[in-house]
Image: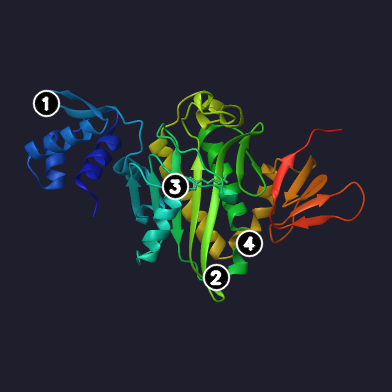
Amino acid sequence: MPSADHVILRELLAREPEFTSGAELADKLGITRVSVWQHMEKLRAQGFEFEAARSRGYRISRRPDKLHVALIEVHLKGRARRCPITLLDEVDSTNDEAARQLASGREAPFVVLARKQTKGRGRLGRAWHSEANGNLYASFAFRPTLPPGGMATFTLWMGVNVCELISNFAQVDPGIKWPNDILFHGRKAGGMLTEARVDADQIRDLVFGLGLNVNGATASWPGELSRRAVSLAEEAKGTLDINRFAAALIGRVWLSYEKFVAGEHTETFADMWQRFDVLRGQPIAVLQGNKRIAGTAAGIDNDGSLLIRPESGRIQRFHAGDVTLEKRP
Ligand code: BTN
């Protein structure tokens, strides 16, 4: 059942740039015009501004630049409209919150979004910079009926889909660095962290976490990050509508998940990986504990392992590891 805020925003957005009368909104909601006005006051406090014209009604003159759940919902399309969204102002980690909700029996799929994380986590226990300035911290919770081995390429598949979405949405050219980094010209704009809980030979549940620097101003970020990070807005040279983007992302992740569990991803995965892979043909090194293997990146194999062609010897496969791009000799 959509909330009153949802209905008001849906109606106003549907008629843009025309005005929508208060009486019409009251009719739709089955409430008085005074109640409509009270809901609009609440929306004002959340960052909306409305232009009111005598005998014509209202239209939106400003939208919040923060994540706003009703605004995301009105932009959702197709089956993703059924995706329940939890939006938190602040949380330790959206991945941890999604895992807690799964553990307490919440029906999946659902998505947890936060405006800020206090303990955002990345791969290999690293911290994920999660300040409250226009970035996206999202965790999608699923209960796939697949054996654990069936998930080997899941993060990679999600990664290329997120890249394609970013490319279409912001008219920019992202790349993916195996296994989970989204980059522009060597600078990191996003990272993915998939965490599954497994019972015997069956996945119990799975959380796909995505951190994306959407509208952040990375130049002011601490230390090394200011040189290593970039945001979509910086690359696109303009602020993005984060709520519209969040809705498009939810739609894309939902669809990509459905394709994956149906085994349909195999039709396009290899081509998409080739399109976004920033490592292929580049000199790289993989670090695995104390071991360092250098060579030329040669794509991935069917189970998502990274392939490296050392200067001498046979191609080697890496299931895990930390990859660095090396300077050409
Ligand atoms: C990485 O680059 O190593 C992965 C970073 C993943 C960060 C996201 S932000 C949303 C979700 N919550 C977390 O704590 N981590 C992921």
Q: What residue type is labelled 1?
A: Ser
Pointer 3: residues within 10 angstroms few (<14), some, or many (20+)?
many
**Residue for badge 1:** 55
Q: Which label sits in the foreground, 1 or 3?
A: 3
Label 3 residue near ligand 1, CB within 8 Å: yes
Pointer 1: residues within 10 angstroms few (<14), some, or many (20+)?
few
Query: CB atoms at circles 3 and 2 under 8 Å apart?
Result: no
Q: What residue type is labelled 3?
A: Ala
Pointer 2: residues within 10 angstroms few (<14), some, or many (20+)?
some
Q: Give 188 or 42, whichever is nearer the viewer.
A: 188
Q: Which of marks 3 and 2 is nearer the N terminus?
A: 3
Residue 84 vs residue 194: left or right? Answer: left
Secondary structure of the residue carrying tag 3 is strand
Secondary structure of the residue carrying tag 4 is loop
Q: Which amino acid does label 4 sit on?
A: Ala
Tell me if residue 121 can be seen.
Answer: yes
Query: CB atoms at circles 1 and 3 under 8 Å apart?
Result: no
Secondary structure of the residue carrying tag 2 is loop
**In percent of the image, x 71 and y 60: which residue is there?**
302
In the displayed structure, 204 sits above or below 69; it is below
Q: Where is residue 294 in the image (x, y as percent from the top left)?
A: 82, 45
**Residue for badge 2:** 146
Q: In which quarter of the image is the C terminus?
A: top right
**In percent of the image, x 53 and y 42: which residue is there?**
165
Q: How far separated are the C-alphas under marks 1 and 2?
A: 58 Å
Residue 138 is marked as: 3
Q: How far separated are the C-alphas under marks 4 and 1?
A: 60 Å
Q: Earlier in the sequence, mark 4 or mark 1?
A: 1
